[in-house]
Structures are given as C-alpha cells and as structure tokens.
Amino acid sequence: MSDKRIIDSEELLHLIKINSRKTENEEGDLDYDIFVGFDDGTYEGIEIDTSYHILVSNAFLFISQIKGFLEIWDGENLEKEGENAIWFISDYFSDGNIYELEDIERVFKEYIIKSDKFIVVKNHYELFKNMIENPGKSFVVEWSR
C-alpha cells in the first residue's frame, strides 16, 4: 500500500509491471485504478487487475457524481465509507473495454499522456476527497484486494 505521493507515467507503468502476475497461475501483488483527469473535472478510468486484465471504462466519471456520493456517505464511519466507495467504483468499471495484461504498454500509449503526473492515494474514499480538492488532476489508487 502507499502513502500519498506523486509519480509520473513511466514510474506508474514500471510499478504495474513489477506487481503484475508473471505466469498464468500467479496472482498479481497490487491492483491499480487509474483516473486520468481533464480540466473540466471529468475523469477517464482504467482498472488494472494485475492478476487478470485491464479494463478501460466506456464512461467518463464526473465530479458531480463524486460530490453526490460524498453527500450521501461523508461523515459515516470510515470503514463503511471505504466499502461504499469500492462498490461505487466497481459499478463505474462494470462496462468497458477489456485488454490482456500483456497489452499494458499499448493501453498506456492510447490512454495516458506521457508527461502526466499522478497523485497516488491509498484507497477509493481518499481518491474521492482528492478529486474534489484537485479537479482535473490525475490519480491512482494502489491497493490489494
């Protein structure tokens, strides 16, 4: 797991590669939910399940959706907030384009700007708080299932 830090796209790609499974029978170490931020406060999501596949969502995630989630769940107990944030993101990623893990470099070329910087956060609830505070910035949740 990580503390909040900033990394570039090359470091992110390296982290994904070293934490991904090496053979079909292996499990990956950490998973990565990447949110590429745009100036208008929208995000494009990429889920990297380092044991199985890459999923690029077919929908943008809007800052208004994040605010709506926080209006409902903010102030509850942290365990419940975190659990609900994971379900919210799971629903967001329920429809998308699936790629093999071996296609990671191609996915990065298509969806990630090489000069982009990413704020790495430790959980999805922290992700939402940071999206509100830093609209348009790109984020990564580095986590284990």
Image (tube, grey):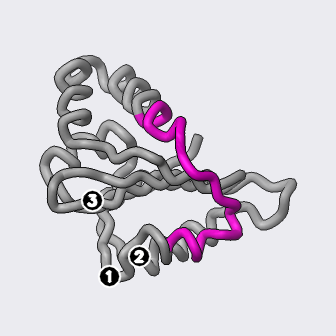
Q: Amino acid at mark 1?
A: Ser
Instruction: Looking at the picture, tell me which residue is in the foreground, 67 or 97.
Output: 97
Q: Residue at x 16, y 44 (%)?
A: 132
Separation of disc 2 and disc 1 at Cα? 7 Å
Q: Amino acid at mark 3?
A: Gly
Residue 76 image offset from top left, x and y in percent: 25, 17
Q: Which residue is mark 1?
A: 115
Q: Secondary structure at mark 3?
A: strand
Label 2 with label 1: CB-CB less than 8 Å: yes
Disc with the residue nearer the chain's start (3 vs 2): 2
Say whether residue 53 is left or right of residue 25. left
Q: Quadrant of residue 22?
A: bottom right
Looking at the rendered image, the quarter that the C terminus falls into is: top right
Residue 105 image offset from top left, x and y in percent: 58, 76
Say whether residue 110 is left or right of residue 117. right
Instruction: Looking at the picture, tell me which residue is in the foreground, 85 or 94.
Output: 94
Separation of disc 3 and disc 2 at Cα? 13 Å
The answer to whether residue 18 is above or below residue 81 is: below
Q: Which residue is mark 2?
A: 9
The answer to whether residue 61 is above or below residue 29 is: above
Residue 35 image offset from top left, x and y in percent: 36, 55
Disc with the residue nearer the chain's start (1 vs 3): 3
Separation of disc 1 and disc 3 at Cα? 13 Å
Q: Which residues are magenta?
A: 89-108
Point out which mark residue 25 bears. Answer: none
Q: Which residue is mark 3?
A: 37
Disc with the residue nearer the chain's start (2 vs 1): 2
